[in-house]
């Protein structure tokens, strides 16, 4: 809806003050929040936020208090990533509250060069494949060391998947087992039923 637009304060105020427009937001099937520059929720249609108890759904309250029940800003908050050159941030995150993946689009609202608020759109993604569809981009992987690039930062696969909220365990494939433990590989693989010559 608001993707890739620079929203100035006049538009933001017009949205906040237009009760007809806000009432239309109730019929949209994803969550829309309007936040002021201090992260207070000035409007929410509360869609797809079943994990938030009704008594915490308070306009004028900090988003981190409402969404996560925290007294301080979230450690992984998008808030510090905005500047006069960045007006839209998109990411997928697994909720620490209910374990669902959600696609976030946060758009900063400017008055000249000063941020005066944010529009936050949150859609639920039920599968990792939907995560990839929602992002519509390729994951850059180093052809030598296999590190993943995200926002100009390189990190291991493990770090990348942990950021997404996915859990996994380590194992060793038959080829690497043979390379690292050549004296024991055949015996181990035959016991596991994975033996291939």
Image (tube, rainbow, N blue to C red):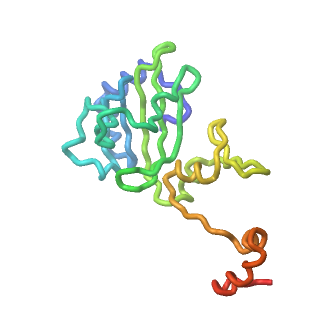
Q: Quadrant of the C terminus?
A: bottom right
Which residue ends up furthest to the front in the rendered image? Answer: 183
Q: Is residue 189 above or below residue 140?
A: below
Residue drawn at point x = 64 percent, y = 45 percent? 155
Question: Nearest the camera: 27 or 30?
Answer: 30
Q: Is residue 167 above or below residue 60?
A: below
Q: Is residue 24 above or below residue 138?
A: above
Which residue ends up furthest to the left in the rendered image? Answer: 55
Residue drawn at point x = 76 percent, y = 83 percent? 196
Residue 168 location in percent, x, y? 54, 62
Decide if residue 145 is on the left or right side of residue 164: right
What is the total number of numbered labels drawn onto the structure image? 0
Decide if residue 21 is on the left or right side of residue 171: left
Q: Is residue 142 above or below residue 187?
A: above
Residue 103 location in percent, x, y? 48, 47
Q: Quadrant of residue 39?
A: top left
Residue drawn at point x = 42 percent, y = 22 percent? 11
Q: Quadrant of residue 4?
A: top right
Question: Nearest the camera: 91 or 25?
Answer: 91
Question: Nearest the camera: 83 or 164?
Answer: 164
Residue drawn at point x = 53 percent, y = 52 percent? 162
Residue 156 location in percent, x, y? 64, 49
Which residue ends up furthest to the top in the rendered image? Answer: 112
Decide if residue 116 is on the left or right side of residue 127: left
Question: Nearest the camera: 159 or 93?
Answer: 159
Residue 2 location in percent, x, y? 49, 34
């Amino acid at each position: 809806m608001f993707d890739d637009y620079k929203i100035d304060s006049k538009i933001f105020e017009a949205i906040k003050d237009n009760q007809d427009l806000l009432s239309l937001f109730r019929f949209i099937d994803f969550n829309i929040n309007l936040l002021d520059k201090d992260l207070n929720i000035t409007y929410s249609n509360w869609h797809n936020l079943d994990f938030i108890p009704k008594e915490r759904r308070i306009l004028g309250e900090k988003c981190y208090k409402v969404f996560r029940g925290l007294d301080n800003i979230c450690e992984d908050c998008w808030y510090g990533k905005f500047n006069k050159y960045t007006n839209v941030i998109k990411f997928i995150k697994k909720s620490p509250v209910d374990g669902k993946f959600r696609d976030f689009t946060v758009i900063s609202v400017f008055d000249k060069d000063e941020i005066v608020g944010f529009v936050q759109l949150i859609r639920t993604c039920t599968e990792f494949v939907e995560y990839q569809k929602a992002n519509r981009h390729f994951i850059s992987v180093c052809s030598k060391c296999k590190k993943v690039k995200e926002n100009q930062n390189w990190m291991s696969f493990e770090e990348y998947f942990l950021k997404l909220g996915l859990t996994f365990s380590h194992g060793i494939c038959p080829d690497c087992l043979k390379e690292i433990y050549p004296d024991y590989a055949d015996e181990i693989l035959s016991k596991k039923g994975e033996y291939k010559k």
